[in-house]
Amino acid sequence: MTTLMSEPETQETSKPQPADQTAAESTEDKAVNDSETLIEVKDNFGFNYGSTQVLFDLNLRIPNRKVTALIGPSGCGKSTLLRCFNRMNDLIDGISHTGDITIGGQSIFDPALEIISLRKKVGMVFQKYNPFPKTIYENVVFSLRVSGRNNKALLDETVERSLRRSALWDEVKDRLHESALGLSGGQMQRLCIARAIANEPEVILMDEPCSALDPIATGKIEELIDELKTDYTIVIVTHNMQQATRVSDRTAFFYLGKLIEYGETTKLFTNPQEKRTEDYVSGRFG
Amino acid sequence: MQVDQGVDLIKGKLLAMASLAEDMVERSVHALLEGDDEVARQVRADDDKLDAMEQEVDELAMEILTMGPMATDLRAVTIGMKISNDLERVGDEASTICKRIININKHADWKVPLREEIAAMGEKACLLLRESMDAYVEHDSEKARQLIPQDEDVDVLNKMYQKQLIQSMMDKPQDIPMLMQVGVIVKRIERVGDHAINIAEDVVFIEEAADIRHDN
């Protein structure tokens, strides 16, 4: 079984000015160095749905144990890219790609790599919380049971660890064997995060995790993201610019399938280098 | 109100503040040259207007900040608050100058030393203020950068005149109270120059996101 190894965490370096991307060249981010990088989109990565290309010439380094936000107008390809990281797009017929994506230096397209293993190491939380119609306990341990791990002590430890880590334990510890569907929306989303954490992933992908939640629940998820990044690399797609500034360390702006600008979140939102970025974050389009 | 409308509103208010602040300094210079108490009192009364305008700018800025401005808009709003503060302080300087003029004028037979020189210094400071606001309106950071070294001229004049006033105090100790009033006037004019340069530095930050405040 091929495993994904994570890179050690190091200090961030200073950031050069990213260049605009054209069809003939890529926007190469040189600010995240080799030792900081966990996920690398490389070799002018491109992605197609059938004959339609939707991602163009991407080169991007996502640092280990940081939060990276992917922003851009609807249809820009950010969710498509997110789903590439755990190869969720493989579930769609007719997809193809060029270039490569590595996690911990290993290509996720390596034929020797088991997809199940990849998806354990790269967990995902979706826009609409989707707990299974099972108990809270069974939701968290689902993947362990599927992989044949049924030791009660292990399951109990996993449930408590995961629910504590997703800031849900105190709210549900007395009703672990009740249906997960009885939880509030925010609690269900935190349960989904706990379910992902139970696999001890390296990466957590979040596709607009708060868009179906009220402001208070959103605040709790954002607080949780801030805590989780000490242990996990998080990539989040969001339409909410303020959320991106609140939770992320780095932000990548996409437009029409291309990476336009990528850098430290504060700099991108206070002093974007590209006019399209400035116009988007200022609300002038998108 | 949208963010860009709010930013335009702030700009309009700052221009109105700058116009009043500059006018107050010019009138205080006139009051000094002409020994005109009435003009000096009007300038002091106008300081309240400038204070109120600063509050309006701050309230508007807070409202815009709740909308989550980004990039240039964010810089324009936050720095707009700083510019309004500098312009309000210019008004304070003019008001203080006029207070001292009124005090000096109580001794009608006392001749203000360096009167014309100090008035010229005041005009120079006014020019710096006007040009810094021009740079703001024109989004011209290069123009703003070129203004910054010109404050040195006003600083040099301040030091020179303060030295001369101190010498006068030594020569005529009985004039010390009046000479100190003049010294305050010179210092306040020098501060007008400082505020103008603060605004120039703020323009550079808005346009370039470069913080040059403490560059040599």
Image (spheres, rainbow, N blue to C red):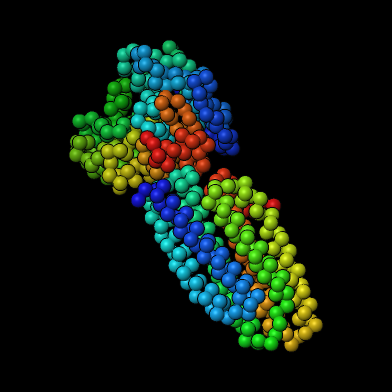
Q: In the rendered image of this protein, does residue B124 appear above or below residue B1?
A: below
Residue B138 position within the rendered picture, expressed as x and y whole percent measured from the top left: 54, 48
The residue lying toward the viewer, choosing from B47 and A188, is B47
The residue lying toward the viewer, choosing from B142 and B42, is B42
Q: In the rendered image of this protein, does residue B179 appear above or below residue A76?
A: below
Is residue B202 shown to the viewer in this render? no
Q: In the rendered image of this protein, does residue A238 appear above or below residue A216?
A: above
- How many marks can you see? 0
Is residue A15 shown to the viewer in this render? yes
- x 44%, y 51%: residue: B8
Residue B129 position within the rendered picture, expressed as x and y whole percent measured from the top left: 60, 60
Residue B58 position within the rendered picture, expressed as x and y whole percent measured from the top left: 44, 60
The residue lying toward the viewer, choosing from B23 and A175, is B23
Q: In the rendered image of this protein, does residue B27 appear above or below residue A26?
A: below
Residue A53 horizontal side relative to residue B27, left or right: left
Residue A271 horizontal side relative to residue A223, left or right: right
Residue B70 position within the rendered picture, expressed as x and y whole percent measured from the top left: 44, 44
Place residue A98 in its image quadrant. top left
- x 47%, y 41%: residue: A269
- x 41%, y 60%: residue: B59
- x 50%, y 39%: residue: A272
Place residue A18 in its image quadrant. top right
Residue B151 horizontal side relative to residue B60, left or right: right
Q: Residue furthest front?
A: B34
